[in-house]
Amino acid sequence: MTVPARVAALFAVAAFGLAACNQHLLPATRTLAGRLILDQATPVERGGGECRGTGGYGDLRSGLPVRASDPDGRLLASGTLAASPVATNADGQVPVPERLRCVWTFVLPALPERPAYWVGIGDRGAVTYTRDELDAAGWNVEVSLGG
């Protein structure tokens, strides 16, 4: 390796190390947290702490990908759905309305600054949020299906 190449490599390593140690040199990012709520007319499938939609919602389940893209379609962050614990009454039974409902959470970390974001769950299309809407919502969103 030539001396100029060694100097360039050393500079690149030093710059990377400095950026990794100084958060002020990294681009600003945000974390988007969300909930997907499914209310359907027929009972959902439950078991082992998991919840799955049925019928036309049979694709909705834990582990389903959630993606955030910019308006140009570039993938910015991804996560997966995770089932929330089911609500029970004082007897430990699942109330009838909860037998028709699944609630999942998701987290999309390290979203870079963009004027708008498309958030898609599985193959169900996407919901568009502007940065101003997300700022106003505290970077927490809720998507509802069914009902």
Image (tube, helix red, strand yellow):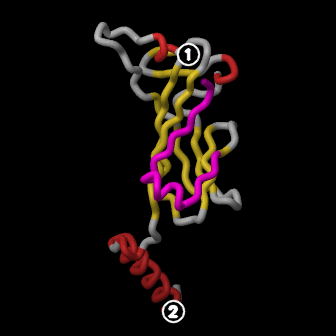
User: What residue is at 60 percent from the left and 48 percent from the top?
Assistant: 119
Residue sticking out furthest to the bottom: 4
Please state the total of marks drawn on the protein image: 2
Residue 78 spot, x, y in % from top left: 55, 48
How crowded pointer 2 is (Cα within 10 Å; few <14, some 14-19, many 20+) is rated as few
Q: Where is residue 38 in the image (x, y as percent from the top left)?
A: 56, 27
Q: Position of residue 5 (x, y in %)?
A: 52, 87
Task: Write down the region rendered in magenta.
Answer: 127-147
133 versus 80 height, above or below: below
Mark 2 element type: helix
Residue type, mark 1 in image: Val
Name the residue at 46% across, 71% down. 27
Relative height, residue 5 to residue 144 (above, below): below
Q: Which amino acid does label 2 sit on?
A: Pro
**Mark 2 or 1: the one toward you:** 1
Q: Distance between the residues labelled 2 and 1?
A: 65 Å
Q: Which of marks 2 and 1 is nearer the N terminus?
A: 2
Quarter of the image with the C terminus in it = top right
Residue 119 colored magenta?
Answer: no
Q: Name the residue under label 2.
A: 4
Image spot of residue 100 (x, y percent): 53, 16
- Badge 1 crowding class, 10 Å Cα cut-off, few under 14, some 14 to 19, many 20 or more, is many
Identify the residue shown where x is 61% and y is 15%: 41
User: For residue 44, which numbered disc appears in the image?
Assistant: 1
**Nearest the eye: 16 or 85:** 85
Locate residue 37 relative to residue 10 in the image: left or right: right
Report whether 90 appears left or right of 8.
left
* Up/down of 116 relative to 54, above or below: below
